[in-house]
C-alpha cells in the first residue's frame, strides 16, 4: 500500500500503513490490510476482506478470529489424531484472478481463507505440524468455474442464488441484469467450465490451486 509520495519521502512502514487499531493476523500477528472491498447490492456486496501481507491469510474484516478460533475453524469437523481438512487457498490463481469475485468469498463461508504458510503457523500454535498439502483438482476447478462466472455476471453466484430463490428478477440489480445473467450463465457455462479446467490445471502445476487439503499431525514429544 503506497501511501507515501515518491518524492524522497520515506516509505510508510507496514505498521503505519495498517488501519489504526485494526485486528491482526491470527496466524502471524502482523497487521491486516484491505484486500477487497465490495459495494452495491445484496449481502455479498457489503464485504471488506482484509489480507495479511506477511503470510497471505485473507479474512472477513467483521469477523477476524483469534488464533485459537482460527485453528478451530480450520480443523472443523476433522477428527482426532490424523487431521485432514480442506480450505480455500488465498494465494491461489483464482483468488488473484477473482479478487472480490473469488467464489470462496461467498457469504456463509468460513471467515478465514488461509494459505499453506498460514496453516502451518496456525497449527504450530496448537502443537501440530503439517505433514502433507494436496490440491484437490475437482474442488479447485469447481471454485475456479464459479469465480469465472462471477467475473462475467452482474450478480455473483447467480445460478446458486437464483435457484435457491434468494435472487429474483425484481431484486438485486434489476430485471434486465437478471435476464442478462440468466442468458450469460447458460451460454457461458460450457466455455467457462473448459477455461476453468485449463486455468486451474496450470495453477495446480504452479502450486497455486484454489483449494488445499491439509493433513496435520500432533507433534510427538
Ligand atoms: Zn499473517
Image: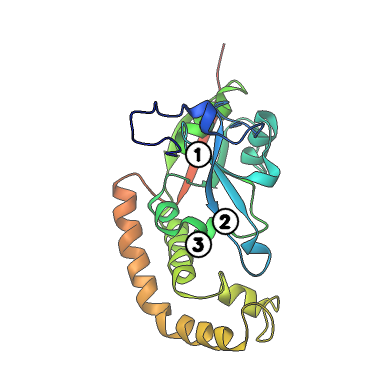
Q: Is residue 82 above or below residue 101?
A: above
Which image quadrant: the N terminus? top left
Q: CA distance from mark 2 to mark 3?
A: 7 Å
Query: Is 164 on the left-hand or right-hand side of 157?
Result: right
Give the residue drawn at x 39%, y 36%.
Answer: 5
Q: Which residue is mark 3?
A: 101
User: In the rendered image of this protein, does residue 144 appear above or below residue 2?
Assistant: below
Q: Which residue is labeled 1 in the image?
A: 214
Residue occupying the far top of the picture = 221
* Foreground: disc 1 or disc 2: 2
Which residue is more in the foreground, 138 or 24? 24
> Does ligand 1 reach within 8 Å of label 2's beta carbon?
no
Q: Please state which of residues 71 and 37 is positioned toward the viewer in this rendering.
A: 37
SS at circle 3 = helix
Residue 213 placed where, x, y %? 49, 44
Q: Are marks 1 and 2 in contact (CB under 8 Å)?
A: no
Determine which quarter of the picture holds residue 6.
Answer: top left
Amino acid at each position: 500500500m503506497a501511501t507515501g509520495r515518491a518524492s524522497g519521502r520515506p516509505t510508510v512502514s507496514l505498521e503505519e500503513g495498517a488501519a489504526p487499531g485494526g485486528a491482526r493476523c491470527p496466524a502471524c500477528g502482523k497487521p491486516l490490510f484491505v484486500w477487497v472491498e465490495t459495494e452495491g447490492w445484496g449481502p455479498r456486496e457489503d464485504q471488506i476482506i482484509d489480507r495479511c501481507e506477511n503470510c497471505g491469510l485473507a479474512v472477513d474484516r467483521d469477523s477476524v478470529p483469534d488464533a485459537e478460533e482460527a485453528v478451530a475453524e480450520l480443523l472443523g469437523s476433522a477428527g482426532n489424531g490424523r487431521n485432514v481438512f480442506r480450505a480455500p487457498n488465498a494465494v491461489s490463481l483464482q483468488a488473484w484472478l477473482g479478487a472480490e469475485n473469488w467464489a470462496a468469498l461467498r457469504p456463509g463461508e468460513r471467515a478465514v481463507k488461509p494459505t499453506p504458510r498460514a496453516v502451518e503457523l496456525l497449527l504450530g500454535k496448537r502443537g501440530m505440524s503439517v505433514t502433507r498439502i494436496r490440491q484437490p483438482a475437482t474442488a479447485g476447478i469447481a471454485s475456479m468455474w464459479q469465480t469465472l462466472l462471477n467475473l462475467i455476471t452482474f450478480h455473483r453466484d447467480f445460478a446458486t442464488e437464483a435457484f435457491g430463490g434468494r435472487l429474483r428478477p425484481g431484486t438485486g440489480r434489476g430485471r434486465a441484469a437478471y435476464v442478462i445473467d440468466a442468458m450469460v450463465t447458460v451460454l457461458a457455462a460450457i466455455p467457462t467450465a473448459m477455461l476453468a479446467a485449463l486455468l486451474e490445471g496450470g495453477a495446480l502445476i504452479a502450486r497455486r490451486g484454489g483449494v488445499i487439503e491439509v493433513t496435520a499431525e500432533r507433534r510427538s514429544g
